[in-house]
Image (cartoon, helix red, strand yellow):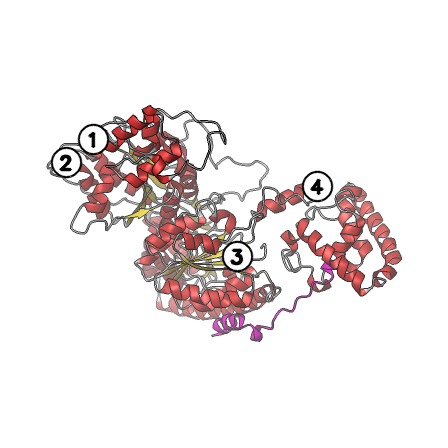
């Protein structure tokens, strides 16, 4: 059983990698206006599909997305392959926690709009010295 | 629940007679009648048309209604009367019941008024040189809230408060809260009035205690005043004797109204809590003293005295300590220098106090050991799941109360301690302290790295909420009464939990609706102790019994409620999302039945309606900081305050 799972994983990765390579170039083709429309649509979809539940409203949550920290967000192709995994590649890979989406519930275009919106997430955490509350806590512990 | 609902009329007042007359004529509609009755007071019945209530509705605009009969009318407006007047009593039986509670230093009785305990309620508010004090009547908007208040108080103080309930209906309303307190091993006394003779039969029963018997520790349904007084004392004794739990006394309404005559309150004798034997204490003491690196794990004890003894023991033998203070009440002070893994994790003697340990564990009896109260075999909460891997019970477990055993162990150590041993111990304490301090700073830095992301985000990060609040309260006497499992548990790393009541722990039965009432109960304890209560309140939980906000205002409770307003029953939202994902049906409808949308709820306005000072909704974290300071200032003055904060989901 483990061997089968391993082979499926390898196969999944190979398919994913080939899609990645073919899709890399397309990321930069959108105009600024197109990008704005896509992000606006993505924002609504991000809310409607409840992505905020685990990823927060700004990409900081149970599983962080802001600042491009997620390997899943490397490219549109990897991202698409990931969210389709459970519904279209059985048995479920690679995660059993993230809901997976068939095209019937979330079209490629909708999924890519969400992708574009997530890509806008930026987070600038303060240094401890710049956050008075955190600084006070650390100083109290050091006394 | 009240006489208003009885539908039984006895001793009609002039206004009631008028009601029947008008009703029989069929000339007054229901709404018109109610308006007239309320406006007219007890002695005057005005015709409904005077208010024009129905005048704007034409005959053809809706079907004519059939007037209710006289009996229904009387029920509708609460014109049915209490039972016939009683003979004047010289010394009321219920006064003696209050005296028993007063002698036991019961501070509060929370109640929602009912028709089976007016005798006791009248005594509570009028009896004695200082009426309505020790105990004081606390108005609750729901029986569940009354029990939750007693629950929060019990967890905070380690001793019982009372909840007074109305017969079968009040007891059933409260049943979930009782169940939660039972699983929390929380001492409390539940009093249920029972009127077998005069009122609503559906509010009575042959054995109403049976409604909650599987999840109460002890109950009695006494038939005489003398037995009632004894039962109240026994309910207290049983409640505080390990395993601590709610107990129940059913109070016959007629007994409450009796003449007590010369009957005296019986003498109360405190419970004898079982401890380990002297020989066992000597063996444990020897093992602790001979060990080169002893370690003590401390779970939930019962009182400040128990905690003080645990600290004494650790310091006497120089043991490093595990504390559960960030998981619940009554454990070892979190920031004591000995708390941590110490200089070396290789412990050669590990003692557990109310928690499992490698070598010897002293853990008092568990409620699971009470097996004769679940006659129907329902198995509330104790059924073992064969699929779950549980830790095996250690061979070295001693099933006696740890707190009662500590003085014996300390005595044995003091008698065995030598000067040379003591110098070794002092040196070990210094090493432990230094190591634990550096470990604490390291772990704090790691924790803060996880708190910084999302710091400036909107809605507000829960980590920031906890972090910003701490400098404002750290020099006050505070209690975090709200469970934190839905708000990220950030207090565990950021705050210092050094009091028995610093954190009251999670939902014992994982049932919502507890948080607001329990926080109010903790605030009842805090009110007379110059303490404040922090309640970081989930919105889903809040909406079970929001009327408790009014109770907090009415009784001027020092409770700062900060709404964790994520506009959802969020855990369930994620469950439904996951299920939809597994089934490949998308998550765009997962919000149905799991969220508060259309409309959003404005908690500041809701609180304002109940009379509580409030502000919000706030989604800007900088605005939240200023609001938190205003809230802390208010509760320091003894005023409850609510801040509605729009938050990240977790």
Q: Earlier in the sequence, mark 1 or mark 2?
A: 1
Q: Is residue B514 above or below residue B490?
A: above
Q: Which mark is residue B582?
A: 4
In the image, residue B246 sits, relative to residue A21, either above or below, namely: above
* Residue drawn where x is 32% and y is 55% of the image: B407
Q: Which residues are magenta?
A: A116-143
The answer to whether tags 2 and 4 share a subunit is: yes
- Local packing at callout 2 (Cα closer than 10 Å; few below 14, some 14-19, many 20+) is some
**Residue sitting at x 82%, y 64%:** A31
**Residue at the spot of label 3:** B489
B551 in magenta: no
Which element type, helix, strand or loop, lies under badge 2?
loop
Count the labels in the image. Answer: 4
Choose mark 1 or mark 2, whichever is in front: 2
Judged from the image, the secondary structure of the residue bearing numbered disc 4 is helix
| Spatial CA span between label 4 and label 1 | 61 Å
Q: Disc 4 or 1, which lies upstream in sequence?
A: 1
Output the chain of dot 4.
B
Mark-to-mark CA distance, 2 and 4: 68 Å
Name the quadrant of the C terminus of chain B: bottom right
User: Picture coordinates of residue B212 (x, y %)?
Assistant: 39, 34
Question: Marks 2 and 3: same chain?
Answer: yes
- Per the image, the residue denoted by label 1 is B224
Q: Earlier in the sequence, mark 2 or mark 3?
A: 2
């Amino acid at each position: 059983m483990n061997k089968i799972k391993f082979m499926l994983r390898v196969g999944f990765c190979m398919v994913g990698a080939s899609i990645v390579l073919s899709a890399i170039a397309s990321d930069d083709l959108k105009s600024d206006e197109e990008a704005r429309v896509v992000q606006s649509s993505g924002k609504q979809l991000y809310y409607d599909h409840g992505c905020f539940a685990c990823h927060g409203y700004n990409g900081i949550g149970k599983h962080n997305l802001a600042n491009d920290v997620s390997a899943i967000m490397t490219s549109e192709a990897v991202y698409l392959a990931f969210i389709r995994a459970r519904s279209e590649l059985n048995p479920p890979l690679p995660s059993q926690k993230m809901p997976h989406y068939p095209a019937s519930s979330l079209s490629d275009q909708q999924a890519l709009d969400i992708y574009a919106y997530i890509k806008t997430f930026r987070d600038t955490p303060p240094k401890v010295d710049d956050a008075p509350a955190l600084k006070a806590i650390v100083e109290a512990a050091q006394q | 629940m009240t006489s208003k609902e009885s539908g039984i009329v006895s001793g009609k007042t002039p206004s009631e007679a008028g009601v029947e007359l008008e009703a029989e004529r069929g000339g007054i509609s229901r709404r018109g009648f109610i308006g007239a009755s309320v406006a007219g007071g007890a002695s005057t019945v005005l015709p409904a048309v005077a208010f024009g209530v129905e005048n704007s509705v034409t005959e053809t605009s809706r079907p004519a209604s059939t007037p209710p009969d006289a009996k229904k009318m009387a029920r509708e407006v609460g014109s049915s009367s209490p039972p016939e007047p009683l003979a004047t009593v010289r010394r009321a039986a219920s006064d003696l019941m209050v005296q028993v509670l007063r002698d036991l230093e019961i501070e509060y009785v929370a109640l929602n008024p009912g028709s089976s305990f007016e005798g006791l309620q009248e005594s509570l508010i009028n009896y004695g040189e200082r009426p309505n004090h020790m105990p004081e009547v606390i108005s609750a908007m729901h029986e569940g809230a009354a029990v939750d208040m007693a629950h929060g108080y019990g967890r905070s103080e380690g001793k019982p408060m009372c909840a007074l309930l109305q017969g079968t209906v009040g007891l059933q309303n409260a049943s979930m809260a009782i169940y939660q307190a039972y699983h929390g091993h929380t001492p409390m006394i539940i009093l249920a009035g029972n009127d077998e003779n005069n009122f609503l039969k559906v509010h009575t029963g042959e054995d109403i205690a049976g409604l909650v018997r599987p999840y109460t520790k002890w109950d009695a349904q006494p038939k005489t005043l003398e037995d009632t007084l004894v039962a109240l004392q026994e309910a207290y004794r049983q409640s505080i004797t390990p395993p601590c739990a709610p107990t129940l006394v059913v109070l016959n309404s007629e007994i409450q109204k009796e003449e007590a005559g010369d009957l005296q309150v019986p003498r109360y004798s405190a419970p004898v809590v079982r401890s380990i034997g002297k020989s066992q204490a000597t063996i444990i003491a020897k093992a602790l003293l001979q060990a080169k690196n002893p370690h003590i794990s401390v779970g939930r004890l019962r009182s400040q005295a128990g905690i003080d003894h645990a600290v004494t023991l650790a310091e006497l033998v120089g043991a490093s300590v595990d504390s559960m203070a960030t998981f619940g009440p009554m454990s070892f002070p979190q920031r004591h220098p000995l708390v941590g893994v110490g200089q070396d994790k290789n412990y050669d003697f590990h003692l557990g106090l109310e928690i499992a340990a490698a070598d010897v564990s002293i853990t008092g009896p568990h409620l699971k050991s009470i097996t004769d109260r679940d006659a129907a075999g329902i198995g509330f909460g104790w059924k073992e799941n064969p699929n779950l891997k549980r830790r095996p019970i250690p061979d070295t477990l001693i099933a006696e109360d740890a707190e009662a055993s500590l003085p014996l162990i300390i005595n044995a150590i003091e008698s065995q301690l030598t000067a040379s041993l003591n110098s070794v111990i002092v040196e070990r304490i210094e090493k432990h302290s230094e190591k634990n301090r550096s470990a604490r700073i390291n772990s704090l830095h790691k924790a803060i790295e996880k708190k910084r992301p999302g710091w400036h985000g909107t809605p507000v990060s829960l980590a920031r909420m906890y972090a910003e609040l701490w400098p404002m309260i750290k020099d006050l006497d505070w209690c975090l009464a709200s469970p934190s499992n839905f708000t990220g548990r950030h207090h565990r790393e950021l705050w210092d939990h050094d009091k028995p009541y610093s954190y009251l722990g999670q939902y014992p039965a994982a049932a919502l609706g507890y948080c607001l009432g329990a926080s109010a109960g903790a605030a009842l304890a805090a009110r007379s102790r110059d303490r404040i209560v922090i309640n970081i309140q989930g919105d889903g939980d809040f909406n079970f019994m929001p009327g408790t906000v009014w109770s907090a205002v009415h009784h001027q409770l020092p409770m700062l409620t900060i709404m964790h307003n994520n506009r959802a029953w969020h855990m369930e939202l994620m469950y439904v999302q996951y299920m939809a994902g597994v089934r490949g049906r998308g998550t765009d409808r997962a919000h149905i039945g799991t969220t508060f949308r259309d409309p959003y709820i404005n908690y500041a306005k809701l609180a304002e309606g109940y009379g509580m000072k409030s502000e919000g909704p706030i989604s800007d974290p900088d605005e939240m900081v200023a609001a938190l300071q205003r809230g802390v200032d208010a509760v320091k003055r003894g005023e409850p305050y609510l801040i509605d904060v729009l938050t990240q989901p977790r």
